[in-house]
Amino acid sequence: MLVNKPITVYRGEIDKSVHMGLSWTSSLEVAEKFAGRFGKQGSIFKIVLEPKQILAAYADDGEHEVLAIVSEDIMNAVYLIG
């Protein structure tokens, strides 16, 4: 998937997740599934990424995965949903 404009992505985490890892998703529904894995009540984060921040994006993997490095300089742009 070619990303040529800013894109909103989400990350669902539970207590065993690597905080702010590489894998994000363009689907809120997918993030909710990851946040609810193993019967846990996890967290969902949201961020808007610029194309230059995206390492790869997959439209056909079922998870709408976006790989990005969320560095400290953009951490203040990450929002907790719910």
Image (tube, rainbow, N blue to C red):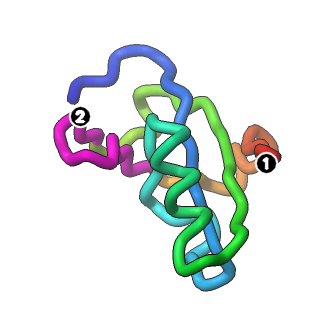
Tell me which label, 2 or 1, sits earlier in the chain: 2
**Mark 2 lies on residue:** 59
Residue 64 covered by magenta stretch: yes
- Where residue 24 sits: x, y (%)? 47, 50
- Residue at 37% x, 50% y: name it: 67
Q: Identify the secondary structure beneath mark 2.
A: loop
CA–CA distance in space, label 2 to label 1: 24 Å
Query: Relative to 45, is 16 above or below?
Result: below
Q: Are marks 2 and 1 in contact (CB under 8 Å)?
A: no
- Farthest residue to the left: give it: 60
Q: Magenta segment: does it hold 81? A: no
Question: Would you call the spot at circle 1 few (<14 residues within 10 Å), some (14-19), or many (20 or more)?
Answer: few
State the image coordinates of residue 16 (x, y, percent, origin top left).
60, 84
In the image: residue 6, left or right of residue 39? left
The N terminus lies in quadrant: top left
Q: Residue at x 56, y 76 (%)?
A: 18
Q: Residue furthest bottom?
A: 16
Please say if 12 is above or below 58: below
The structure residue drawn at horizontal position 44% and vertical position 44%, both measured from the top left corner, is 25
The answer to whether 77 appears left or right of 32 in the picture is right
- The residue range painted magenta reads 57-68
**Amino acid at circle 1:** Leu
Q: Where residue 68 sits: x, y (%)?
A: 44, 49
* In the rendered image, the vertical position of residue 34 relative to residue 68, given as above or below: below
Q: Quadrant of residue 72?
A: bottom right
| Crowdedness near tag 2: few (<14), some (14–19) or many (≥20) residues, C-alpha within 10 Å | few
Where residue 55 appears, as percent x and y from the top left, is 33, 45
Residue ID for mark 1: 80
